[in-house]
Image: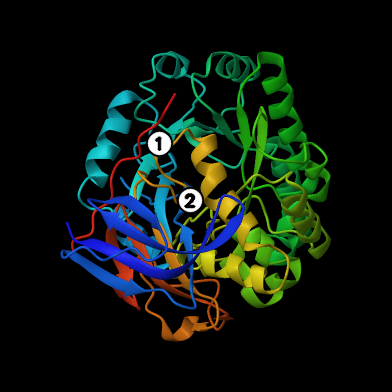
Amino acid sequence: MINYLITNARIVNEGRQTESDLLVQNGRIEQLGAGIKAPANAEVLDAAGRVLLPGMIDSHVHCREPGLTHKADMASESAAAVAGGVTSIIDMPNVQPPTTDHAAIVAKHELARGRASTNYGFHFGATNDNIEAIKALDTSLVAAIKVFMGASTGRMLVDDEATLDQLFANAPVLVITHCEDTPMIEAAEQRARTRYGEDVPMREHPRIRSREACLRSSQQAIELAHRHGTQLQILHLTTAEEMALFEPGPMAGKQITAEVCAHHLFFADSDYADKGTLIKCNPAIKSAADRAALWAAVADGRIDILASDHAPHLLAEKQAGYFQAPSGLPLLQHELPSLLDHVKDGRLTLEQLVEKTAHNVAERYAIAERGYIREGYWADLTLVDLQQPTAVEFEPLYSKCGWTPFAGHVFNNRIQATFVSGQLAYHEGKLSQGCTGQALQYVR
């Protein structure tokens, strides 16, 4: 393994910015401080004028493997991640077959080993009939239990109230929920069909996947968590009304936490006119006023974690009509650049970005020795130039689906280098060959 000395970095970590050198040896952060002398076997990277961040841990990713690999796989999507400054990903269970039993979670670890450029972890899926598997869960293999309380199909939709009660009562790890009320959505779909037939305009999407459906389901999840003392995180929140359900302030000590995703902080319903089904996702992108409420919640700590909900589909699939076009966007390569643009615009500080993309993710999912720039921790690092722009149209796209909702956009920053477990995975516009991430370990 090559060792590295990063010099003259502006390190953003644990609420502070400091000028420092950083020595990486054997995959870990060996030393932090000024004037570190380069060992004979270390390559030197001068970071002058740039910022060094703990690598982003994206805890909400759909890599589509197994079963849907025409859209994406662990190799392609982890390549997109490191190109975007993301060093660890945690993959969702709604694949084919779904990750809802012990054999499936073991198989996913085997699929990722040696193929993922990032570090990797996996969520376990709940169903209406796998409560015994959840009770017997090997918690060393999973980050959390994912519950689709809406917006899923087949066995992955958990809509039986008795099952939900048992699940929240017996979950051995953090429960994470997709909260939308399916009966309300189905009724809204029927109303839209009555009015428009099959040619429903995309502007109707936030009315079909309505704020009321989101709020009702989020309230139900929180009530269940309070009833059973369950550790709960609600994913990809979208509405102003839901922000009132969460406590402001630091994440430490919270039983119930909240996540918001990069596209819900970037786009608003006015963008449907231009982007159409390319920004169709569940829950739906809603109004500019909702987006402003999300930003206020990021600022006061009601939102604890920022993620992507990276969910690639083929462009041909997305170009179908409203009911046929699948929901989901490819975001791994551009989520961190989009968040860094918000730093430039004053909506977010670098310290807040690091807290909500690295520190809090490591703490909430009990990830060992990652998420911070600390001596002895794994060297998961992202070097960013905040002065150099990135024109998306001139950059290679690494996600297998080959498109991005940010087409034509110019970000006001550039990912210069990404280190994964001490390996230089991406540098100055090029992926490194042979970089392989590690399975995340948990401290519980």
Residue 151 horizontal side relative to residue 50, left or right: right
- Residue 380 in sight: no
Residue 243 horizontal side relative to residue 324, left or right: right
The chosen color scheme is: rainbow
Tag 1: amino acid: Ala
Which residue position is annotated with label 2?
Answer: 58
SS class of the residue under badge 2?
strand
**Foreground mark, 1 or 2?**
1
Residue 223 horizontal/vertical position (percent): 74, 23
Front one among 272 and 384? 384
Numbered circles on residues, count:
2
Residue 8 horizontal/vertical position (percent): 43, 71
Residue 167 horizontal side relative to residue 370, left or right: right
- Residue 260 in sight: yes
Quarter location, residue 315: bottom left
Tag 2: amino acid: Asp
Which residue position is annotated with label 1?
Answer: 368
The residue depicted at 44 percent of the width and 56 percent of the height is 55
Earlier residue among tags 1 and 2: 2
Residue 19 horizontal/vertical position (percent): 50, 66
Front one among 412 and 100? 412
Residue 184 horizontal/vertical position (percent): 75, 39
The residue depicted at 52 percent of the width and 19 percent of the height is 171
